Structure formats: structure tokens, C-alpha cells
Amino acid sequence: MGHLPLPQPYSFELSTERFRAFGLDRANVWHDDALHRFVAGREVRIAAAPGGVEIEPWDDAIAAEALRHLGADFDLPAFYAWAAADPVLHRVASALEGFRPPLVPDPFEALVTSITAQQVSLQSAFAIRSRFVERFGTAGRVAYAFPTRERVASAAEEELVALGFSRRKAEYVVGLARAELELDALAALPDDGVKARLVELRGLGEWTADWYLARHLGRPHAWPAGDLGLRKAVRVFYGEGEDVADLGARLHPFQNLSAQYLLTGLLVVAPTAATGRA
DNA sequence: TACCAGGTAAAAA
DNA sequence: TTTTTACATGGT
């Protein structure tokens, strides 16, 4: 067991909202007031602790990956100072002080997670993805290790269809697993380069590439302008007249944090307005 | 029941 | 070149 300090401010409660809001994700299990998932190859339990989190079990590799996973690299004080000039963002950021968007540690997990969420509700996506994780992943005590690329490469598309994947998405996921592209190498490329490589693969479009930049690589300027949830959040917080692409340009250089604050704001700040009837 | 939900590729016009 | 359609599940 180890104590992992995180840059302040940090709210464990707000930062883990995503793991409770949409149903069960077998690879990121909220249980017993803690987040259970595989980090650096081992199943860990991450719980709130003064000034950060406590992690069990503990070693240097786990600590390093957990830091990144928990969003330690985001500069929240700089973001808040900058957001103070925008009344809308200031309101949302103030209500979510200490929210650090978690990053998906594994690139394959990030992409498959996005594919499962294409077009369908997050509730549906979580349900289908959990069945996939249980079928092809490795069971731990509480959580499952997300299926490896190698395991999925050897799967039959028909096996995914049986879990509720559309035939098209089953082809995307197995095709991605079997593709030549070296995912770890993408981290060395600029945003545009990452997107160009990803959208060459069947089933990975601009939306998926944007979320890869935002949720896996943690790139500051990522802005998934086509995302339905983000579009709703912009409508709710900025009003009908606001153009999502224009707003993205205006939110430079904090597009990623802005997008994630607006989306979490839908869950936490304006649950009533989020119905779209406000 | 029908419609919508954190898209994408392929067919049709 | 631009527009339309199919896709599968879960919630309402």
C-alpha cells in the first residue's frame, strides 16, 4: 500500500464520476468507495486519501502510470486562471474545482472503448463493452484486465457479434487489433499526425481520433467538436446560438480541459438543464 | 411503440 | 460531390 500525492487541487470524488455515471465497466470498476482497474499490468485499488490517493498494491511502475491515469499532468491552476475571463466556463470550473479528467492508460483500450461508444448511448456502450471485457479479458479479484490486442486479433468477428456488437463494429475492432499500426509510436507525433494515422484505419473517424487525443494522450488542444454530448453541453451552458467549432477556437489553448469540464458539468452542475428542456 | 443516444462507411442521388 | 441509409443495444 502506498500514498500517491497529486498536484492540488484534486477531488477524487469529482474525478471518478465518470466511472459511476453510465453503468458497469468491468475494466474500471467502482466498488467499496474505490476504483479498481489494472495499472502497469497489476490490479490495483485506488481510494481517496489526504492530498491524493492511496494505491494498493504499490510499486514504482504502478505509481508512475497511476499519476498519468489520474490526470496529474493537467495544469489546473493555469486553467482556472484562464477560465476566469469566460463567465460560463468560470461557473463550471468553480463548481468542479479539483476535477482531473482521468486518462485511459492503454491505447488499444482507448480506441476500442471509443468504437463501442460510436452512435449508441453510453449506457449501451458500457453494457456491451463490459461483456466484451468479461469474454476476452483476464479476471482479477474485482476488475478485469482489458483484453489485449493479441487476444482480440485472434478472435472471430462472430464472437463479438454474439456480445451485441454490430457486424460493422466487430469488423472495426478485430481489424484494429490486426492492423500494422504501432499505437505506442503515435505518442511521438503532433496532434494532426496522430489523427491522420488513426483515420486511415477502417472504423476510426475524426470523432474517435479526437477522443484519443483527449482521453489517452491528454493533448491540451483536443476538442471533439462532433461529439453529441459536448454539443449538448455547449447548448446548455452557452446557449443555442453558440457554434461548437467557433467555441473550440476561442477556448485555445485549453480545449481539452474545457471539453471535459463542460461534459462533467452536464452530470454535476446542471443535471436539470442537461435534459435539454431548460 | 417508436425514438434517441458521446459515429462511420458505403450506397445512392 | 453531396446526401441518405444501415447498423444493434439500452433507456424512456
Image (cartoon, coloured by chain):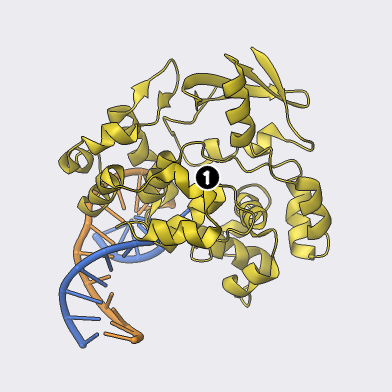
Chain colours: A yellow, B blue, C orange
In front: A274, or A6?
Answer: A6
Is residue A130 something one can see in this rendering?
yes
Q: Position of residue A270 (x, y in %)?
A: 66, 54
Residue drawn at x 40%, y 41% as measured from the top left: A108
Q: Is residue A241 left or right of residue A213?
A: right
Please tell me whether mark 1 sits on a helix, a strand or a loop.
Answer: loop
Is residue A32 something one can see in this rendering?
no
- Position of the N terminus of chain A, as image quadrant, is top right
Q: Position of residue A95 (x, y in %)?
A: 76, 48
Residue drawn at x 61%, y 65% as measured from the top left: A234
In front: A21, or A252?
Answer: A252
- Label 1 resides on the chain identified as A
Q: Is residue A3 left or right of residue A202?
A: right
- According to the image, label 1 marks what residue? A216
Q: Is residue A37 left or right of residue A149?
A: right
Q: Position of residue B5 (x, y in %)?
A: 44, 57
Q: Position of residue A261 (x, y in %)?
A: 66, 52
Residue drawn at x 39%, y 45% as measured from the top left: A182
Residue drawn at x 69%, y 37% as measured from the top left: A72
Please tell me in which quadrant of the rendered image residue A110 appears: top left
Please tell me in which quadrant of the rendered image residue A127 appears: top left
